[in-house]
Amino acid sequence: MIRKAAAIACLLLAAACGGNANTSGTTDPEATGSDMRTMTEDEAAQRAEEHIKKAVAALPEKPTLTLLRADSAECLDPTDNGPRGRYEVSRSYWLDNLPEGRNAEFVDALHEYWTTSNFRVLTDKRDGHDRFVSVESNDDAFRMSVKESVEGDLSLGASSPCVWPDGTPPDEVDG
């Protein structure tokens, strides 16, 4: 239970952190409001999985991925100042069956991968027993994080910027 709560808190923190850069997942950086197009929720889920797969490939040992969370939630207070009605898609996994006592090495490997793959670091807490790193892709504004639970388990997550469910805004947007 603590493991699940820690991972969810980690993902919520990663989603809450960030600036007001183009985090809308738009295909046109000049588009705003109801004219902006985004990837769809399904495309965002696929992209989150791709980010996770690439990050896992950077680890010196290959973990077993155990699904922790696969959902989407409405962006109620978008940091990009865009309209409501868009969703953030999240995926997270436990990194199971990794050798014990090497979490610092695994977190460092992810940090190295991210910083050399055009991600910017939002939070870097690699020291101590509760390691946590969150990053945002400069290419597509997806956020990723790795978190060590109090039990010493690692979780890895990815979340999309705010996207329209079908990639285009509805005819009328409340905002």
Image: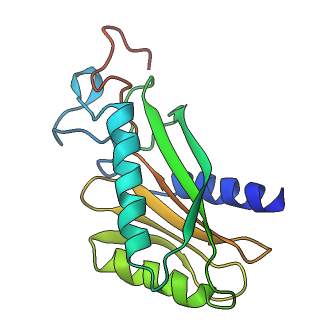
Residue 168: give x, y in percent of width and height: 27, 22
Question: Residue 14 appears in which quarter of the rendering?
Answer: bottom right
Residue 69: give x, y in percent of width and height: 61, 47
Vertical placement of residue 28 versus 84, above or below: below
- Using the rendered image of the protein, determine whether residue 80 is visible from the camera's viewpoint: no
Query: Residue at coordinates 44% horizontally, 15% vertically from top-left?
Result: 174
Q: How is the image coloured?
A: rainbow
Residue 75: give x, y in percent of width and height: 50, 34
Question: Residue 85 appears in which quarter of the rendering?
Answer: top left
Q: Is residue 145 left or right of residue 128?
A: left
Number of marks present in the image shown: 0
**Depth check, front residue: 15 or 90:** 90
Query: Residue at coordinates 30% horizontally, 42% vertically from top-left?
Result: 25
Q: Is residue 170 left or right of residue 2?
A: left
- Quadrant containing the C terminus in the rendered view: top left
Extreme residue toward the right, this view: 1
Query: Residue at coordinates 73% horizontally, 61% vertically from top-left?
Result: 6
Question: Residue 100 appears in which quarter of the rendering?
Answer: bottom right
- Quadrant containing the N terminus in the rendered view: bottom right
**Depth check, front residue: 96 or 22:** 96
Query: Residue at coordinates 32% horizontally, 22% vertically from top-left?
Result: 166
Vertical placement of residue 115 versus 87, above or below: below
- Using the rendered image of the protein, determine whether residue 65 is visible from the camera's viewpoint: yes
Vertical placement of residue 89 versus 117, above or below: above
**Depth check, front residue: 165 or 175:** 165
Residue 167: give x, y in percent of width and height: 28, 27
